[in-house]
Amino acid sequence: MQDDHEHDATEAPSEIELRVKALESLLVEKGLVDSAALDELVDTYEHQVGPQNGAHVVAKAWIDPVFREHLLANPGSAIASLGYSGRQGEHIRVLQNTDSVHNLVVCTLCSCYPWPLLGLPPQWYKSAPYRARAVSEPRKVLEEFGTHLGTDVSIQVWDSTSEIRYLVLPQRPANTHHLSEAELQQLVTRNSMIGVETLKPFSDAND
Amino acid sequence: MNGGHDLGGMHGLGAINPESEADEPVFHHPWERRVFALTLATGFLGRWNLDQSRHARERQHPIDYLRNTYYENWLAGLQTLLIDSGLLTEAELQSGFCGEGFPNQEIVLTKNKVKAKLQEGKSVELPVATSPQFVIGQEVMVVNRHPIGHTRAPRYTRGRRGTVIHQHGGHIFPDDHAMGDQTGQHLYTVCFDAAELWGQDNGGNEQVYVDLWESYLTSGGTKQ
């Protein structure tokens, strides 16, 4: 999927591409990094760790009330019980959306994000406009994502200034009572777990 | 420091224009993959910590920080860290050639260790001998302080009042950590009414939650 964005072999390498290549060669020559380990790091976050992990947690919380309680009371242990843990997910809190409360996550100072559950953040999450505006005009930000919430819904914005990482537990979409955990997992979007969107009512026509 | 990175509330940056979730690749250019991986891999050498790494990006000229793409900022930070730690010289960085007499260091992160190293993570909890100064439900104010070093109290919170809603126990204090010292302080989540942060005309039915360390906070003061 990512390969569409590989640069065209006939294109001359950009200045930054050359600089990064030179830096990698230098660090390899010095014995400070191993190129195979770099490949493995890239592969991990490009192909293995991603929002499907968070979606698994959310879908399980929807169908299993005991797990949901555990997740809200002791998120680290609940999430680890599904096999997710590690770097940038050492201290996780889960924020539950309800009819009257909508949670939204940002990192105004850098780009803190729960890697083991969502992978690496999308470009917009790391961008200056999102970081600037999510705290000061969250309703307008949500509108830009097509999320229209009434003024009766309280917007709670979480600025990730510490090493605590936040995951939004979105509301289960309507018309999903007949779906299995695996089917529900497919409905959970990354954006709903950051809090910029809510999940649309399910219909078979969705797919 | 009041750098280009402290963006909460800044105006004039335009629309967010998100790429569609289904179509966005993890990396947008091949070189971004390498900058990401080089940053993580060199981090495992143990010469600097996460707050030093953040501070290296923040220390750029604000115009550079804001003009750069995300991974350009990572690259700038990485070069600073490599030079400051003595792992590379400026001359080596410029020429691309290894200088003489550099002892080869043992590679810390080999391919077969990547999974385990990422899996193990690194807790930042650090027990603190004193009891927490603030209790849940207490009104607090963020001290109006403008340190020239790294800090995690965003500018938009300083001098503002909020309510403690969570105590997290002792966490490594980032301001000291960025200077290479590991000290612990109680960490709290503080809830601010949006109107307290952005003025009475703004933020109906909105709250902003910020994780703040004990020395960022004081009791007293009145709401804006």
Image (cartoon, rainbow, N blue to C red):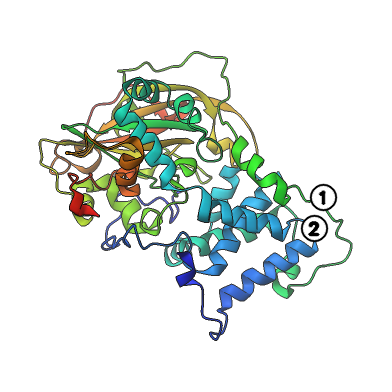
Amino acid at the residue labelled 2: Gly
Q: Quadrant of the C terminus of chain B?
A: top left
How crowded pointer 2 is (Cα within 10 Å; few <14, some 14-19, many 20+) is rated as some
Asked which quadrant contains residue A62, the reply is top left
Which residue is painted at 28% across and 48% down in the image?
Answer: A134
Cβ atoms at labels 2 and 1 below 8 Å apart: yes
Residue B150 horizontal side relative to residue A25, left or right: left
User: Does residue B156 appear anywhere in the picture?
Assistant: no
Residue B98 horizontal side relative to residue B90, left or right: right
Q: Nearer the viewer, residue A127 or A149?
A: A149
Mark 1 element type: loop
Which residue is painted at 22% across and 50% down in the image?
Answer: A142
Which residue is painted at 20% across and 49% down in the image?
Answer: A204
Amino acid at the residue labelled 1: Glu
Q: Which residue is mark 2?
A: A31
Q: Nearer the viewer, residue B67 or A57?
A: A57
Q: Which residue is mark 1?
A: B106
How far apart marks 2 and 1 lie (CA) works out to: 7 Å
Give percent across and percent down for residue A145: 23, 54
Asked which quadrant contains residue A135, the reply is top left
Q: Pointer 1 indicates a residue of which chain?
A: B
Give percent across and percent down for residue A114: 45, 41
Tally of marks: 2
Can marks 2 and 1 be said to lie on one chain? Answer: no
User: Does residue B88 appear anywhere in the picture?
Assistant: yes
Q: Pointer 2 indicates a residue of which chain?
A: A
Mark 2 element type: loop
